[in-house]
Image (spheres, rainbow, N blue to C red):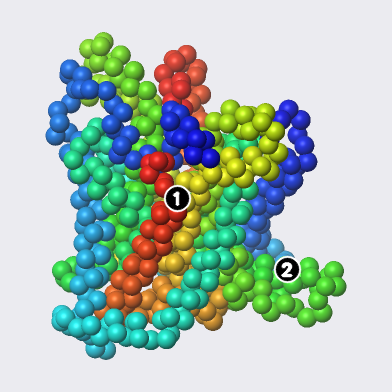
């Protein structure tokens, strides 16, 4: 297996999904008439400034404020650990994390299965590049429309008098409308799968199209069945794509509050929804402490994924 | 796989793919249908006649909070985010072509921007503006919040583009006496133009639909997604679907315009008989 992976890594593959800074090292030595050395710094400066001010500084602010005190109307600069004691000492927090992790596990498994199957079909069964692009775009277009609208669009489908219940009743499968279709865990999971599967399809598709077809032919020539080729050649080579997709899906679900709120009809909770409620009550330090805990959990999950699969080869 | 005849595996997977596409588009089509619901119709089927009532209601302030204003703000914000995303990602993409110190931390910062939960960005920027005493507004704090989401995408696309960019074209231009600016303007830019349109498309649509990052950063006036989100809890008429149809229609318009422009660019390049870009597109 290692040999296969190494071959793929050594092969000068086309267009990685997310090439890293290492790509720059491939460039040959400096040519005469080339731009001076300070130019890259100037070119990278706007990105660094924007991310510094709108990402790094806000996160530092959250960490600082999480130690502040607050009352019903304002936040008071201080250094107290009460916020963290409240967050970690409350069983509501633990229950909410458990609930969020439940959604994450279920949705991850489903999006991975659907995402891999779709990407596999596009990469190996569609012959022309044009057709691949067209079908891929068909999958991408909904991703570029509003998440909230896509969520709402399930309501006439799943509601008490919705299409699904009408269908189930007309074929005589149920007498009464099924109540758990909308405003339930089922609805939350369904909407999340609907919203996030594309984040799995894209990176896996990118990994799959880069697999050298000679490897698959070699497997077949050596007598491997289609299933054996899939398990022993394709899936190991798709691991970086699977990891990147998983990072996307897991972080999106861990941070989700709108899907949970709308699709569960307010009956279910998630970590971000708990934060949002604290924010609407102006309990910013409490929300900040929650945010720090959530960030740590999310980073640990990403680190765990990266421990299992080394995506640096991909970058 | 890769066999000459299409076996049962192909048809099985093709059926799965069709189901997936139906799953993606099916629900969306139901709200488009229901937005033409008759005057006495409700939020679900059956259709109670056919009318444009709900589209008309969009422009009455009592039915929807401030549709016109929020729509204008979201459009302007989307265009601002698009312009900055294209420019900044392009510059950063050019920077990453060379080795420079701090390139690795900057790359990881951009990746972190994708991973950090969006509600944290919202809360963090909201708090930051509160602490330094600036009133948050859609054109300042929400603008920055959106950029933390669009710029990493833009950067990743530019890195992918430049990673497979054939430097021979630039060398040829240089050998023929072009200045660095001329090389960029007449060789590099035309070659990467389709990708830049892709970055622009991402920048606009991601901002136009962004909700979580705007929540704490929009200030006094709502953007469209915030308005729609508020409506989900208190509007019980198909006016909600009419709004959904209009905004989705606009998204589709933007997406297909971008695709059409890319297609025209490629046709034009092919027609002019230049071999520029072969192997890079």
Q: Residue furthest top?
A: B176
Residue, x 38% and y 44% (percent of image)?
A: A312
Decide which of B249, A2 is in the foreground and name it.
A2
Mark 2 lies on a secondary structure that is helix
Figure quadrant of residue B9:
top right
Specify the farthest residue to the bottom: A72
Q: Is residue B165 above or below residue A310?
A: above
Task: Please tell me in which quadrant of the rendered image residue B116 appears.
Answer: bottom left
Q: Position of residue B48 (x, y in %)?
A: 72, 69
| Residue occupying image coordinates x 30% and y 50% | B108
Q: Quick one: B155 or B85, which is closer to the camera?
A: B155
- Mark 1 or 2: in front is 1
Q: Which mark is residue A164?
A: 2
Q: Return the mark for residue A68.
A: none
- Quadrant for the C terminus of chain A, please: top left
Relative to residue B7, is residue B148 depicted above or below?
below
Instruction: Name the residue rendered at 45%, 29% in the picture.
Output: A11
Give left or right: position of B18 versus B155.
right
Q: Which residue is mark 1?
A: A309
Q: Quadrant of residue B50?
A: bottom right
Which residue is rendered at x = 57% and y = 55% of the image?
Answer: A112
């Amino acid at each position: 297996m290692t040999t296969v992976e190494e071959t793929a890594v050594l092969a000068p593959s086309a267009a990685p999904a997310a090439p890293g800074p290492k790509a720059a090292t491939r460039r040959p030595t400096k040519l005469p008439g080339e731009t001076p050395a300070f130019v890259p710094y100037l070119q990278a400066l706007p990105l660094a400034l924007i991310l510094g001010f709108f990402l790094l500084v806000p996160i530092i602010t959250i960490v600082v404020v999480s130690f502040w005190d607050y009352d019903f109307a304002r936040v008071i600069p201080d250094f107290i650990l009460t916020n963290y004691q409240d967050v970690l000492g409350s069983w509501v927090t633990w229950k909410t994390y458990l609930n969020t992790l439940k959604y994450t596990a279920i949705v991850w498994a489903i999006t991975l299965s659907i995402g891999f199957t779709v990407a596999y079909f596009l990469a190996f069964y569609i012959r022309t590049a044009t057709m691949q692009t067209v079908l891929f775009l068909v999958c991408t277009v909904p991703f570029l429309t509003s998440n909230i609208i896509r969520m709402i669009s399930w309501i006439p489908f799943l509601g008490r008098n919705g299409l699904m219940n009408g269908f189930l009743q007309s074929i005589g499968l149920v007498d009464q409308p099924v109540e758990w279709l909308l405003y339930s865990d089922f609805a939350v999971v369904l909407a999340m799968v609907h919203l996030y599967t594309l984040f799995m399809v894209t990176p896996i598709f990118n990994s799959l199209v880069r697999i050298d077809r000679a490897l698959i032919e070699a497997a077949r020539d050596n007598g491997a069945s289609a299933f054996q080729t899939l398990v022993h050649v394709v899936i190991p080579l798709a691991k970086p794509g699977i990891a990147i997709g998983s990072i996307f899906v897991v972080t999106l679900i861990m941070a989700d509050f709108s899907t949970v709120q709308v699709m569960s009809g307010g009956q279910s909770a998630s970590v971000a929804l708990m934060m949002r409620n604290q924010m609407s009550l102006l309990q910013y330090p409490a929300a900040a402490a929650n945010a720090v805990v959530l960030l740590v959990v999310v980073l640990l999950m990403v680190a765990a994924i990266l421990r299992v699969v080394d995506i640096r080869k991909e970058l | 796989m890769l066999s000459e005849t299409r076996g049962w595996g192909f048809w099985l997977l093709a059926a799965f793919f069709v189901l997936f596409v139906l799953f993606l588009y099916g629900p969306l089509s139901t709200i488009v249908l229901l937005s033409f619901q008759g005057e006495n119709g409700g939020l679900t089927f059956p259709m109670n006649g056919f009318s444009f009532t709900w589209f008309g209601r969009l422009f009455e302030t009592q039915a929807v909070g401030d549709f016109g204003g929020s729509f204008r703000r979201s459009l302007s914000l989307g265009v601002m985010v698009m312009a900055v995303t294209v420019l900044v990602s392009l510059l950063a993409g050019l920077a990453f072509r060379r080795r420079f110190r701090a390139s690795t931390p900057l790359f990881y910062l951009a990746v972190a921007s994708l991973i950090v939960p969006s509600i944290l960005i919202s809360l963090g920027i909201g708090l930051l503006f509160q602490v330094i005493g600036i009133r948050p507004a859609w054109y300042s704090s929400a603008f920055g919040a959106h950029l933390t989401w669009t710029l990493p995408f833009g950067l990743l696309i530019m890195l992918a583009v430049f990673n497979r960019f054939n430097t021979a074209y630039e060398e040829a231009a240089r050998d023929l006496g072009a200045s660095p600016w001329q090389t960029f303007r007449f060789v590099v830019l035309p070659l990467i133009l389709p990708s830049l349109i892709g970055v622009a498309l991402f920048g606009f649509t991601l901002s136009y639909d962004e909700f979580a990052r705007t929540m704490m950063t929009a200030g006094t006036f709502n953007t469209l997604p915030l308005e729609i989100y508020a409506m989900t809890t208190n509007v019980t008429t198909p006016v909600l679907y009419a709004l959904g149809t209009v905004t989705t229609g606009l998204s589709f318009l933007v997406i297909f315009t971008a695709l059409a422009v890319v297609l025209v660019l490629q046709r034009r390049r092919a027609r002019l008989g230049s071999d520029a870009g072969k192997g890079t597109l």
